Image: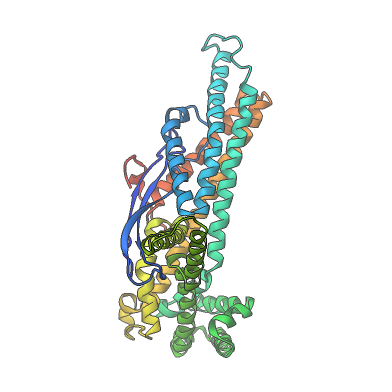
Amino acid sequence: MSCVGVSLDSGGLGIASPQELTLVQLEDPVHDAHPPSEQGYVVQTTLYSPSAFPNIPSGLNLLFLIPATLRLIATLRRAFCQGDKEEVVDVGMRVLGTPMNVCSSTGTLLQILKYLIQWKIVAPVAGLFFLAPFIFVFGIILCAIEIIINIINFVRVQRFCHKFNFDLFAQLKILLTNFDLDTNFDSAKGLQAVKRSSKLLKKDPEKFKSIFGDEEYPEIAKTLADMEEKIGEDPSKCVSVLRERRDTIEKMAISLMLHDLYTLRDDYLKLTDGETETICAKVREKLSGCHGDQSNLEVQKKLENALYNAHIVKKKKLARRVQPWMFQRIETQSPYIIKAFEKKICGSSDPSHYEESLPLVRGLVLFEEIEIQTVKARIILIIEIMALAVTICVFILALAGCPVVPFSVLIALSLVLCIVRFVIYRTTSGMPGWRWDMKRILPFTS
C-alpha cells in the first residue's frame, strides 16, 4: 500500500488576495511500466485550490495581482506537464480572467471615488470617469468566469456522488450497528431505514442486479420486504427481526461496499491494467516517430514518467472532490477494508467490538464521511455562486447609474455572502463530519 502524506498551507486568506493559491502537498507513489500497485517511491506534487474568499473585483486585488498571477502561471504550466485537464481548465480560466480583474478592480476604485465626490468628501477630478462604464463590463465578465468555474466544480462533485451509494449506506449503518449499540433503539427509525433501503433497490433494479447478481438480488429484495412487513405489524419486534436477518443484510452491505471501494480504487487511486497498456502504447508510438535511436533506459524512463503523471492526476481528482485529508484517509483505509472483505474477515461477532474491529462498520463510517465532505463542498460552491451573481447585479446597477442606496445594499449583500463562504470554508475545511473550528478563521492557522 502506498504511503500518502498531506499538509495544508493556506494561501489566500482574505479580500486582499482572492486569487492566491492554497498548496497541498501530496506524496504519491511512482512505479515502473506496470500498474502502480506493488512497488514505488515517494515524490511530492501540488494540488491547486483557490482562496477561501471568492474572487470578486476589489481595489485591494491590485496589491496582490503580480504574485497571484505568477503562481497561477506556474500552476498552469505544471498542470500542462502532468496532463491534468481539470486543473488546466480551472487555472486557465482564472488566468484569462486576470486582465478582467485588473480592469474591474480599477473600476471599483473609480466608483468609490465617484461617490466620495458626490458626498463632497473629495474634490471633483475632470475626465476621470470616462472609462468607468466600460470598466464595469470587465467586472461582469470576471464574475461570469468565476461562476462558470464554480458550476464546473459543482458538476464534478455531483457526478462523483452519483457513482456511490451514499443513501443506501446510511440506511445500512442504522440496520447493522445502531440497534446493537443503543439499548433505546428507535423502532420507527429502523422501519424507515428498511423502507428506504427497499425503495432504493427497486428504483434501479438493473444496477443492483449487476452488483449483487441476478440470483442474489431477488433474495435481498424479498428479505427487505419481509422485514418491512414484520416490523410494520409489530414495531416492538424490530430489534429481533434485524438480528434474525443480519446475515443477509451484512452480505448485501459487503457486496455493495466492495463495489463502491473498487470504483474508488479504479477511478481515483490506481491505474488499471487497461489504462497502463494504453499509456505505454501511446508513449511507444510517440517515440517510434522520433528521429534517432532511444536507449532502453530512456524509453523506460519516459514510460515511468507518463505512468507517474497519469497516476498523480487520478489521485488529484479524488483530493479535489473530497478534501486532501479525506483523500489520505481513503487511501489508507480502503485497501484494508477490501482485503478484509476479500478474505471474508468481517471482524468480531461480539456487538461490543463492532466499532473497533468490524471492517464493514469502518467502511460505512468512511463512506458517511465522504458524503459529508461532498455536501460541504457543494454548499460552499452554491454560496460562492450566489455571491458572484449578486456582484454581477452590482456592476449592472453601476452601469445603469443607479442611486447609491440600492447599490450599497447589494454590495453589502455580496460582502456578507463572501464572508459566509470564507467562514464556512476556513472553519470546516480539514475537519471531519460537521465540526468546525472558529480559531481557523485567523490567518496562518490550518
Residue 190's spot in the image, x, y percent?
A: 49, 78
Foreground of the two, 173 or 445:
445
- In the rendered structure, the answer to whether residue 37 lies left or right of residue 57 reads left
- Please give the name of the residue rendered at 37% of the width and 51% of the height, measured from the top-left corner: 24
Residue 433 showing in the rendered view:
no
Residue 28's spot in the image, x, y percent?
A: 36, 60
Foreground of the two, 262 or 183:
262
Residue farthest along the front direction in this orientation: 292
Where 426 falls versus 347 (above or below)? above
Color scheme of the displayed model: rainbow
Residue 80 showing in the rendered view:
yes
Q: In the rendered picture of this protein, how many numbered marks are placed on residues?
A: 0
Residue 100's spot in the image, x, y percent?
A: 57, 32
- In the rendered structure, the answer to whether residue 93 lies left or right of residue 11 reads right
Where 169 falls versus 214 (above or below)? above
- Please give the name of the residue rendered at 55% of the width and 57% of the height, measured from the top-left corner: 156
Foreground of the two, 262 or 426:
262
Residue 322's spot in the image, x, y percent?
A: 45, 59
Where 381 falls versus 433 (above or below)? above
Which quadrant is the N terminus positioned in?
bottom left
Where 268 falls versus 442 (above or below)? below
- Please give the name of the residue rendered at 61% of the width and 12% of the height, measured from the top-left corner: 127
